[in-house]
Image: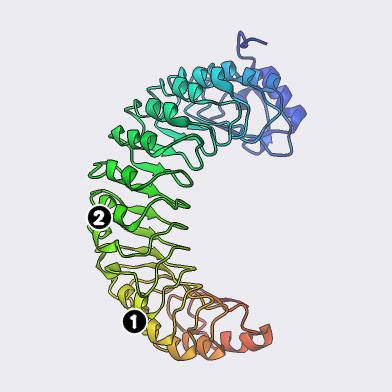
C-alpha cells in the first residue's frame, strides 16, 4: 500500500460516519474534516492502516494521537508524512521499526514526537530519527536506545525536551553525551544506569530547568553538587533513589529550584542538612521516608513553600509546630504521621486550601478548629473512624458567607 495520491474529504467524512467518529461533537462532513487541527480517536474505535491513508493530506491537522493502537503497522508512516501541518504526533506502543524511524526523522514540520514503548526500534533506528532538525520534544520511554542512539541524539541542536525513562542499552558514557545539547530544558533519565559522572557532565548547563532521576540507585549525594550549579533548574525529582540528604547544602546553590521531590529516599533526621536554605522552593515532598521532627525543623525555614508532602513519615506534634505557621502553604499532606489534635492546634496558615490528616491522631476537634478557616476548601479525614453523622454538625457551623468546605472521611 503506497501513499494516497490525493486527499478525499468526502471519503474520509464517510469513513468517520461509519466508525462513529465525531468532529467537534458533530457528525463528520467534508467541510468539517478539512478544518480538523487535532485528532485523538476514541479507544473503542478500531482503525486500520487504510483509515490513516484516508487522512493523508489533511490540510490543517497539527496534532495526531495514535498511541496504543497496535493494529496499525509501519505502513502508515508515509501517510503521516503527507500531513503538511502536522507538528505533534504520538505513536506510543506501535510497531515502528528502524525504517519507520528514519521516515519520521525526515518529516520537517514535526516538533513533538512520542514513541514510548514503540516496538521494532534499535539504536540504528534512533540514529536515523536523530537526523531530524525539527523535533524539539521527544519521548522514548522503554525503548532500546543504546549508546549509539544517545550519541546521535546528542547531535540534535534543537532538542529541548527528552524523555528516556527506562531506556534500554544505555550506559553512563552514553548519557554523558547528552550534555552537549545546549538548548535542552527538560531531561528524564529515570530508571537508567545514570551515575554521578552523568550529573557532573551537566554541571553549569545553561538551559536545563527540569531533571527527573527517579529509581536510580547509582547516584549519590555527592552528585548533587553538580546539580547545584544549574542556574535555571526549577524542578528536580529524586524519588526512590539512595540519596540521604547530606548533599542538600550543595544542591541549594541551584537558586532557581522551586520543586524538589525526595519520596522514598533514605533521608532522615540524622542525615538531612541544609534543607531550609533553598531560597525560592514552593513545592517539596519528603513523603514515605524516615523524616521526622528534625527534618520538619529545617522545613520550617522555607517561607516560600506552597505545597508540602510529609505524609508517611515520623513527624510528631513537636515537629509539626515548626511548619504550622508557614505563611504560603496551600496544600498540606500529613496523612499517616504521628500528628494529633495537639499539634494541629498550632496551625496558622492563612492560605491553606487543602489538608490531608487521614490516618493521624486527629479528631473532630481539629475540624472544629478549622471549620471557619477563610480559604480552606478540602479536608481529608479518612481512617479516623468518623461518620457522616459526626462530621455534618461540625460543617454546619461554617459561616454561610464562606465557600463550601468538603470533608472526605
Instruction: Tell me residue 25's x, y (percent).
Output: 65, 39
Along the horizontal axis of the image, is 19 left or right of 298?
right
Q: Quick one: label 1, few (<14), some, or many (20+) residues within 10 Å?
A: many
> Where residue 18 sits in the image (x, y, percent)?
77, 27
Q: What residue is rendered at 44% in x and 63% in y?
A: 265
Res 85 visible: no
Q: Is residue 335 left or right of residue 321?
A: right
- Residue at the far right: name it: 18
For residue 107, above or below residue 186: above
Instruction: State the residue at coordinates (44%, 27%).
Output: 149
Residue at image coords 36%, 58%: 259
Q: How far from the left and from the top, in percent, is residue 388?
A: 67, 83
The CA distance from mark 1 to mark 2 is 24 Å
State the SS at label 2. loop
Residue identifier under label 2? 254
Q: Are marks 1 and 2 in contact (CB under 8 Å)?
A: no
Graded by Cα atoms within 10 Å as few (under 14), some (14 to 19) or many (20 or more), the crowding at tag 2 reads: many
User: Residue at label 1?
Assistant: 322
| Secondary structure under the numbered disc 1 in the rendered image | helix
In front of the other: 84 or 263: 263
- State which tag comes first along the sequence, 1 or 2: 2
Quick one: quadrant of the N terminus? top right
Image mark count: 2
Amino acid at each position: 500500500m503506497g501513499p494516497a495520491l490525493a486527499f478525499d474529504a468526502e471519503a474520509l467524512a464517510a469513513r468517520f460516519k461509519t466508525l462513529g467518529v465525531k468532529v467537534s461533537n458533530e457528525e463528520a462532513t467534508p467541510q468539517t474534516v478539512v478544518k480538523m487541527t487535532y485528532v485523538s480517536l476514541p479507544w473503542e474505535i478500531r482503525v486500520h492502516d487504510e483509515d490513516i491513508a484516508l487522512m493523508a493530506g489533511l490540510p490543517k491537522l497539527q496534532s495526531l494521537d495514535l498511541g496504543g493502537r497496535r493494529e496499525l503497522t509501519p505502513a502508515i508512516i508515509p501517510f503521516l508524512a503527507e500531513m503538511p501541518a502536522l507538528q505533534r504526533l504520538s505513536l506510543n506502543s506501535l510497531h515502528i521499526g528502524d525504517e519507520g524511524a528514519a521516515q519520521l526523522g525526515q518529516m520537517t514540520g514535526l516538533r513533538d514526537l512520542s514513541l514510548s514503548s514503540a516496538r521494532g526500534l534499535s539504536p540504528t533506528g534512533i540514529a536515523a530519527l536523530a537526523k531530524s532538525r525539527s523535533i524539539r520534544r521527544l519521548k522514548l520511554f522503554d525503548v532500546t536506545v543504546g549508546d549509539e542512539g544517545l550519541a546521535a541524539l546528542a547531535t540534535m541542536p534543537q532538542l529541548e525536551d527528552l524523555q528516556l525513562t527506562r531506556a534500554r542499552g544505555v550506559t553512563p558514557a552514553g548519557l554523558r553525551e547528552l550534555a552537549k545539547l545546549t538548548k535542552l530544558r527538560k531531561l528524564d533519565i529515570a530508571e537508567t544506569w545514570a551515575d554521578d559522572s552523568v550529573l557532573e557532565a551537566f554541571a553549569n548547563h545553561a538551559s536545563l530547568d527540569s531533571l527527573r532521576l527517579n529509581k536510580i540507585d547509582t547516584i549519590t549525594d555527592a552528585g548533587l553538587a553538580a546539580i547545584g550549579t544549574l542556574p535555571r533548574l526549577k524542578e528536580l525529582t529524586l524519588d526512590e533513589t539512595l540519596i540521604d540528604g547530606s548533599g542538600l547544602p550543595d544542591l541549594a546553590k541551584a537558586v532557581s529550584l522551586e520543586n524538589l521531590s525526595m519520596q522514598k529516599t533514605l533521608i532522615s533526621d540524622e542525615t538531612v542538612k541544609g534543607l531550609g536554605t533553598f531560597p525560592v522552593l514552593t513545592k517539596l515532598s519528603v513523603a514515605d521516608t524516615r523524616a521526622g521532627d528534625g527534618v520538619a525543623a529545617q522545613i520550617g525555614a522555607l517561607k516560600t513553600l506552597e505545597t508540602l508532602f510529609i505524609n508517611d513519615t515520623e513527624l510528631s506534634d513537636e515537629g509539626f509546630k515548626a511548619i504550622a505557621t508557614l505563611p504560603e502553604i496551600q496544600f498540606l499532606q500529613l496523612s499517616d504521621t504521628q500528628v494529633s489534635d495537639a499539634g494541629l492546634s498550632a496551625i496558622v496558615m492563612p492560605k491553606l486550601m487543602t489538608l490531608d490528616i487521614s490516618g493521624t491522631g486527629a479528631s473532630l476537634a481539629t475540624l472544629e478548629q478549622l471549620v471557619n478557616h477563610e480559604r480552606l476548601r478540602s479536608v481529608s479525614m479518612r481512617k479516623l473512624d468518623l461518620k457522616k453523622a459526626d462530621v455534618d454538625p461540625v460543617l454546619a457551623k461554617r459561616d454561610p458567607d464562606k465557600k463550601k468546605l468538603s470533608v472526605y472521611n
